[in-house]
Amino acid sequence: MQVADQVLNVENLSIDIPLSGDILHAVDGISISVNKGETLCIVGESGCGKSLTSLAIMDLLPQKAVRTVDKLELNGSSILNYSDRQMSDVRGSKIGMIFQEPMTSLNPSFTVENQMVETLARHRNIRGKEAKKLAVQMLEKVGITPAKQRLKQYPHQLSGGLRQRVMIAMTLLCEPELIIADEPTTALDVTIQAQILELLTRLQADFNTGLILITHDLGVVAKSADRVAVMYAGQIVEEGSVYEIFDNPSHPYTRGLLSCIPVPGKIKRGEHLGSIPGMVPSLIGEFTECRFAGRWGDTLGKEEENIAHLTPIEGVDYAFLVHGTTDHVVRFCCNSCLKKSKSKISKGVN
Amino acid sequence: MAEVMIDAKNIVKDFKISKGLFRGKETLRAVDGVSLQVLRGEILAIVGESGCGKTTLAKILLGLLQQDSGTVELCGSKIEQIPRLELAKMVQPIFQDPYSSLNPRKSIGSIITLPMRVQGEKNSDVWMKKALQTMDLVGLPARMFDQYPNQLSGGQRQRVAIARALINSPKIVICDEPTSALDVSVQSQILNLLNDLREELNLTYVIISHNLAVVEHMATQVAVMYFGEKVEEAETDQLFSNPQHSYTKTLLNSILSPDPRQRNKKN
């Protein structure tokens, strides 16, 4: 892995939200990196800090939230101490963002043309005919025809899939180095979802963009990801290449998630699916017990046929390499959930 | 042969849509000649894209909308001739979003017992007892009886909605996207619960869903709708292995397999 190819590098990011008398630790010391042309999927249940992580990268957190981070680098240069003005240059031009609901992220009172041309004027100083030409080209690239007529339309005249395409076209106008897509297909029909994912992957390869895809749909992950980070209660519990995660899930939570989805052929009709009892714990205050307390049900801790071999990572508590590859890291929150995972831990190997 | 629970023939439903001030009205045919038959104990899934008339059809089966033509028979009698209260005992809905389907100002106990009170049960001991039984059945702890919806998680709320639907022991339950607002971990709990309840209470389900993995896991029979028409209906295995209509094929091609090695095989 060459550092030169790295688009984004975040080290030890924490987000605290002060409440009256207590602190909500929304994100707790996570590190992620994305390379050029790579797709990193962040998965997890609602309320585990996925979306706040993406907002923190863009410096768009709610006012009260406190972000602490050791390193925040875009293309090798730190954007940690950027002023608001500098950051707003970065947003849109270097980091693009695609949200879940395209109706709320497009301005309903302006035409598609207005919004696209404005983006170009703001970030690339391109105006007039040339801007319009670029906008038409980009709409055609994302598969919107006839592009010229569509430019004159307002968001409410477009269907959900078309709106999301317009969002993607707008994001790509400034040729960003990194795109953060937060549940980009959740609001769409399955047929449209497949088209949009296909489109994102194709454009990403064309432009060699890094992509962070936030989703809770493991089907989307299997379809698009190069690497996967599984988040739980503000931490990344397992990270690795998509094949490693699906073939060798080593954290009991990842296994639990994978057992929850009905897979044709693997589970008979009407048979019980795996499930994770309880819910994501409250992140207010400090943890006194295991983050997975109350969630060890039938699934978590069961089904251990392929026992993972873990190698401890020095200097980080309860963090391990799976099968000795740096490509696959698993992190437990405490001794008790480590014991429950029933993995084999080798000692004295670096 | 098993008892026919739902027998719908040639249902048509039009909506009048205003084209604008002074411009008169336009007719939108939401459901166009759909016929369905569901036998006791079956699970019929209705799939299709948004706006294809799935929910309108569900509302007609629930007696919440009147069809413009065609007939609906539930358990052998015409839906128009079943008194409202009787109909509510026979068929009950479970909706998509448990955040908007529960009244935030009523306690869980009063939400669950409302159908009994509507049916004229006066004795509070009776409905209290029945409510606690039903809560136990759907896996809600009894202490939640006095709590309010905002104190519950999404999965628990959906269980409340299920308890409310089941308290008068209906024969048919119509689930409109029962899990699409929930996390996968919670979705599997609710699907397991629906499956258990079906066996225990001998229920018949109509499930509306756009999640084809869920449909394949749950349904015995699948009907595909496209622009208001039923374009295909078959047994689940048959439909998934040998789709006939081109829209069904498109739909099946867009399933995202939870296996990264499958990703390049399709499309």
Image (tube, coloured by chain):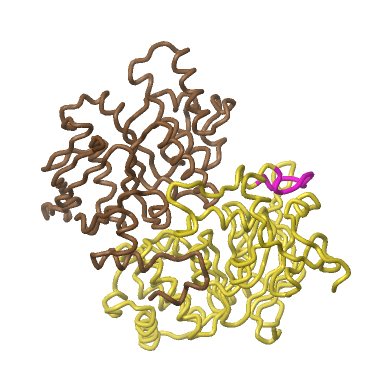
Part of the protein shown in magenta: A281-293
Magenta: main secondary structure equals: loop
Horizontal and vertical percent for residue B236?
33, 54
Q: Residue at x 16, y 53 (%)?
A: B28
In the foreground, A336 or B107: A336
Horizontal and vertical percent for residue B177?
38, 48
The quarter in which the C terminus of chain B is drawn is bottom left
Horizontal and vertical percent for residue B206?
32, 43
Q: Residue at x 82, y 61 (%)?
A: A317
Q: Which chain is yellow?
A: A
Residue B151 appears left or right of A200: right
Q: Which chain is brown?
A: B
Residue A318 appears left or right of B195: right
The answer to whether residue B38 is visible is: yes
Q: Quadrant of residue A305?
A: bottom right
Q: Residue at x 25, y 68 (%)?
A: B246
Q: Residue at x 50, y 62 (%)?
A: A183
Q: Is residue B187 above or below residue B117?
A: below
The quarter in which the N terminus of chain B is drawn is top left
Q: Quadrant of residue A149?
A: bottom left
Q: Is residue B140 above or below residue A197?
A: above
